[in-house]
Image: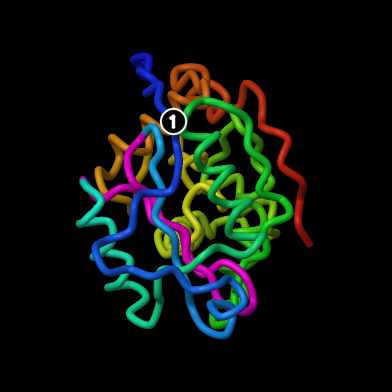
Amino acid sequence: MTSSVTHIVAALAPLPPRAGFRAESSSAACAGQGFILFDTAFGPCCVVWGPRGLLGLQLPEGCERETRARILQRFPDAREALPPVDAQQARDGVIALLRGEAADFSGVALDLDGAPAFHRRVYEAARAIPRGATASYGEIAARLGAPGAARAVGQALARNPFLLIVPCHRVLGAGGKLGGFSAHGGVATKQRLLAVEGVDLIRAAKVSRGARSPRVPRLS
């Protein structure tokens, strides 16, 4: 059902800054918000951070200029800067994941200040879904001890600022339906992400109907 994804074979490195740009040191950026644009197999992505951890991850918006404009719309106070350790780990993991390799984001600190408590629990549950597996909105709700809250789970994931790090693309609708996706490209991007992770959507639909559930721990 899912077509294979052609991987772009290229040296993946941070994008060259715009003319006149002077990178600030990571220590200076830690006093406020910083971001770095970098190339991936899907196109230019961006990681944004603040003093307490990552603030967001931006998937490609079509081109580098549009991605930069989108990130500045979301985080108008952010400035391009040299990334601290957490942002470097996030960047390296995104590059690896989008070219079909394993990526470990477990050590990346997220700044969840201002996120509702329920959203935080949803994000924690989604982070536990391993690469190559999926779960449904209803399964996440059940594991949170809130059966019947599938719609609320979907709403929380629709506001997920940490795409890929909180892998909301691995959460499907009932019966294995793709559901929504808030990044540029919508469901087509979600399907492409699942394909590059080796997810068979036909099998995922059977799993969602009860053949076998993914191993996502129950959260109290």
Q: Is residue 168 above or below residue 146?
A: above
Q: Nearer the viewer, residue 93 or 191?
A: 93
Q: Nearer the viewer, residue 55 or 131?
A: 55
Secondary structure at badge 1 equals loop
| 50 is within the stretch colored magenta | yes
Q: Is residue 69 left or right of residue 1?
A: left
Neighbour tally class for label 1: few under 14, some 14-19, many 20 plus, Cα within 10 Å: few
Q: Nearer the viewer, residue 141 or 43?
A: 43
In the picture of the structure, the residue carrying the numbered disc 1 is 11
Q: Is residue 70 above or below residue 12?
A: below
Q: Is residue 18 above or below residue 49?
A: above
Q: Position of residue 60 (x, y in %)?
A: 31, 47
| 164 is within the stretch colored magenta | no
Q: Position of residue 215 (x, y in %)?
A: 73, 35
Q: Residue at x 47, y 59 (%)?
A: 47
Location of the C terminus (image quadrant): bottom right
Q: Residue at x 46, y 34 (%)?
A: 98
Q: Residue at x 42, y 62 (%)?
A: 155
Q: Magenta region: which residues? A: 42-62
Q: Is residue 177 left or right of residue 185?
A: right
Q: Position of residue 174 (x, y in %)?
A: 45, 38
Q: Position of residue 7 (x, y in %)?
A: 39, 21
Q: Is residue 37 above or below residue 217?
A: below
Q: Is residue 95 left or right of residue 70?
A: right
Location of the N terminus (image quadrant): top left
Q: Give, as a three-letter code, the residue at label 1.
A: Ala
Q: Residue at x 47, y 66 (%)?
A: 48
